Amino acid sequence: MREPFSPEPINTLKSEHLDDGVRPIMACVGTAEEYGSEISDFTELKRRAVDVDYYADSEKLASQNHWNAGERTYIISGIDNKPKFTEKLYDCTSVVAVGRDIESNQEISFLTHQDPYSFLRVTRLDFIGDLKKRLVEMKSVCQPSTVDIVIIGGRISDTDDYQKSINLLNTLVTDAFGFSPVVITGPKDNGSEDIYFDTEHRKLFVIRPVSLLSNNSYVAENSETNVKRWKREIISEE
């Protein structure tokens, strides 16, 4: 692990923000066809997992310790040791955070699902306030240098919104933990994603359609460079 106050940025792709022996979130990305028989494993996982249901009504979400600012704005789950999942991310992005509980030594996590159009404009202050509080809570209950955070999702239909959403999420995570999170894949150009997170084993499964852009991971602070490249690719294909 890098020493505190290092002049060089922390490379989260190399897990420099984690103590030795602490696993980063391991992500598996593919289409439903590529996962094949593993799809049945996700069905089993869902039976014992927290459903971070972006499409549920606000009253139901509040009763489950999920935070939001109205239906189809954003949802931020509570922090616990259960697996979690969220489905049908179209333009939406998701944040997955996991760490080791100070008291129990168990792996604990929270998961979000948010619409860039809403949290960049209509519910911006609510979203920023709620995600900040959840990140601060996560930091307070986890052992130092055991927290890993990744971003998933987004669609390239509006590159400005995509980049702004990644930038805002990056700022909030960096302010709270001092590192820029890994974005698991580039944005898709069609369809939606389903996300399943096995908290205990720090395993993330992303089911997404085939994308003409990029499935490669990158560090969130480098979003501008990547978005410029994707724009060039889109123009060259037209």
Image (cartoon, grey):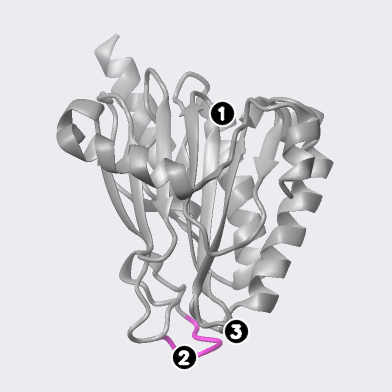
Tag 3: amino acid: Ile
**How far apart are the alpha carbons under marks 3 and 1?**
39 Å
Provide the secondary structure element on which disc 3 rests.
Answer: loop
Q: Position of residue 33 (x, y in %)?
A: 18, 26
Sequence-first tag of 3 and 1: 3
x, y (%) of residue 175? 67, 66
Name the mark on residue 102: 3
- Choose top left, top right, bottom left or bottom right for residue 132: bottom right
State the CA–CA distance, disc 2 to disc 3: 21 Å
Task: Identify the residue shown where x is 53% and y is 64%.
Answer: 81
Report whether residue 215 is seen: no
The mark that comes first in sequence, 2 or 3, is: 2
- For mark 2, does the 10 Å Cα neighbourhood hold few (<14), some (14 to 19), or many (20 or more) residues? few
Name the image quarter holding residue 112: top right
Q: Earlier in the sequence, mark 1 or mark 2?
A: 2
Residue range corresponding to the magenta coloring: 1-7
Q: Which residue is mark 1?
A: 160
Instruction: Classify residue 103 as left or right of residue 67.
Output: left
Mark in the foreground, 3 or 1: 3
C-beta proximity under 8 Å, tags 1 and 2: no
The answer to which of 220 and 53 lies nearer the viewer is 53
Q: Which amino acid is tagged 2?
A: Glu
Q: Is residue 21 above or below residue 206?
A: below
Residue 88 position (above or below residue 142): above
Element class at badge 1 = helix
Residue 64 at x, y percent in the picture: 71, 45
| Mark 1 residue crowding within 10 angstroms, few (<14) / some (14–19) / many (20+) | few
From the image, tell me which residue sits under label 2.
3
Q: Are marks 2 and 3 in contact (CB under 8 Å)?
A: no
For residue 11, which numbered disc appears in the image?
A: none
Find out whether residue 154 is within the magenta segment.
Answer: no
